[in-house]
Amino acid sequence: VGGIAVAYWCRNALVLSFPSPAAGIVIDLPGRIDWRVLVASVAICIGATMLFALMPAIHASHVDLSGALKADGGGVVAGSNRSRLRSALVLVQVSLSFVLLAGTGLLLQSLQRMQKTSPGFSTDVIVSGADLVSAGYNLERAKAFDTQLLDRVREIPGVESATLSRLQPFSYGVFSTAPLTIDGYQPAPDEQLNSSYLEAGEDYFKTLGIPIVAGREFQRTDDENAVPAAIINETMATKYWPGKDPIGQRLKVKDRWLQIVGVAKNVNYENKLELPRTFFYVPVRQNFLENNALLIRTRETPGAIRAALAREMHALDPNLAPTAPFRVQEQVDRKGYTQRLAATLIAIFGAMALFLAAIGLYAVMSYSVSQSTRELGLRMALGAGAKDLLRLVVSRGLQLTAAGIVLGGIVALILTRLMGNLLYKVSPHDPLAFGSALVVITIASLTACFLPAWRATHIDPVQALREQ
């Protein structure tokens, strides 16, 4: 009942601890207790209580009186049969804590490196546009509107460059994909030639800050009257034209031969976790669609640029308004939200497991000290000092901790391999993450053992021996 009450009072606490998907976005999910989760939780609690209450009862029904008398006043070092189960449970708690803390360390390192690593383009670019399809524009009318709008936007004070593309970087949309024929390239019998591509306008690479390592960028003259063109990325150039200059080479897409006019640096296209892959760009004016993203490189804020965009669009069509402008960085943050949320949840569960392990270790050591009063009193009577007793009790707790860390380390080495899709440039067996988990658990264990050890140093040896 107490647990249900605490769960009800804290039902919104977990949601409040979630990281924000992007700047200015607040998660507002009402916390509620699902009856199915509640029933399952109650059933597990009752089952666990019955199980762990039954085991001591069974053990007590098979007491060996002579053995019990011999074991009376069992030592804190050797322990007793009665404490083995408690010690085993604490060992499991420590192991689980180590696994969760190691996983948290891996995810936190991954997130830190993701935030510091550039996706290969400028994330300060502002994205906007207009919904021309809903406004009833056909292809020719949309092309004329976008051309005029680009000219006007480039004249807005503070705008350094502007361009069009079918999708903005890190979009939730799907890139175009098509089978390829590479002129002069003989694929292996089981090799499927296909690649994703993006329709991009002139100044696309300049606006996003993507370096062109060979050839040129798209120009305004790359329209339906010009030779079909393409710009490939470095991975594609290396794969299909190793050791050669790809400029002027051809590839066939949808029964149309494209001439390669440039090679661009590799960038991340959908998220920072993706591996380098073949990718190419085609001129938007040769592959025009009614709705395109408007990308603007400017020193102005999205709010300031929105007013200027609205003014320019209204001059062309009073019925149109720009979509809410946002920086590409916001989209990058949204795409990285899964990793941030996973790190937050694992950190919360790791902290809870560590807290429970510390409580369990404290309980075991407190019980051990209370059951070893005679031994501790005898040691003090024979000349043992406070430091000796502290060392004795703490070493017992650290033995449990060490065993739990070894077991947890083995389990963590196995389970962290499953986290590969969530990690960015971090090994699943990163020594810093495992070392940090070791340090945190050791400190928590020392803290949990200190109070029982301190209590042991204040035992009156005369009274302890008299009572025993």
Image (cartoon, rainbow, N blue to C red):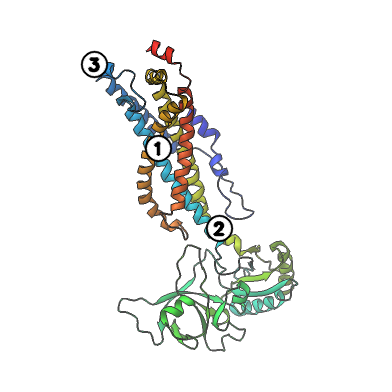
On screen, 234 above or below 400? below
- Asked if marks 2 and 1 touch (Cβ < 8 Å), the reply is no
Type of amino acid at the residue the image marks with label 3: Ser
Type of amino acid at the residue the image marks with label 1: Thr
Q: Earlier in the sequence, mark 3 or mark 2?
A: 3
Q: Around disc 2, counting alpha carbons within 10 Å, would you say few (fewer than 14), some (14 to 19), or many (20 or more)?
A: many
Q: Position of residue 295 (x, y in %)?
A: 63, 71
Q: Position of residue 95 (x, y in %)?
A: 39, 41
Residue mark closest to the camera, 3 vs 2 = 3
Q: Earlier in the sequence, mark 2 or mark 1?
A: 2
Residue occupying image coordinates x 39% and y 13%:
465
Q: Give the residue number, with chain letter if any, for mark 3.
A: 66
Q: Give the residue number, with chain letter if any, for mark 1.
A: 401
Nearest the eye: 299 or 437: 437
State the SS at label 3: helix
* Label at residue 334: 2
Q: Around disc 3, counting alpha carbons within 10 Å, would you say few (fewer than 14), some (14 to 19), or many (20 or more)?
A: few
Q: Position of residue 41 (x, y in %)?
A: 42, 35
Whether residue 349 appears in this view of the structure is no
Whether residue 443 appears in this view of the structure is yes
State the SS at label 2: helix
Say left or right for 23 vs 190. right
Type of amino acid at the residue the image marks with label 2: Arg
Q: Position of residue 220 (x, y in %)?
A: 62, 84
Residue 215: quadrant of the picture: bottom right
Q: Earlier in the sequence, mark 1 or mark 3?
A: 3
Nearest the eye: 294 or 391: 391
Residue occupying image coordinates x 56% and y 67%:
169
Nearest the eye: 440 or 173: 440
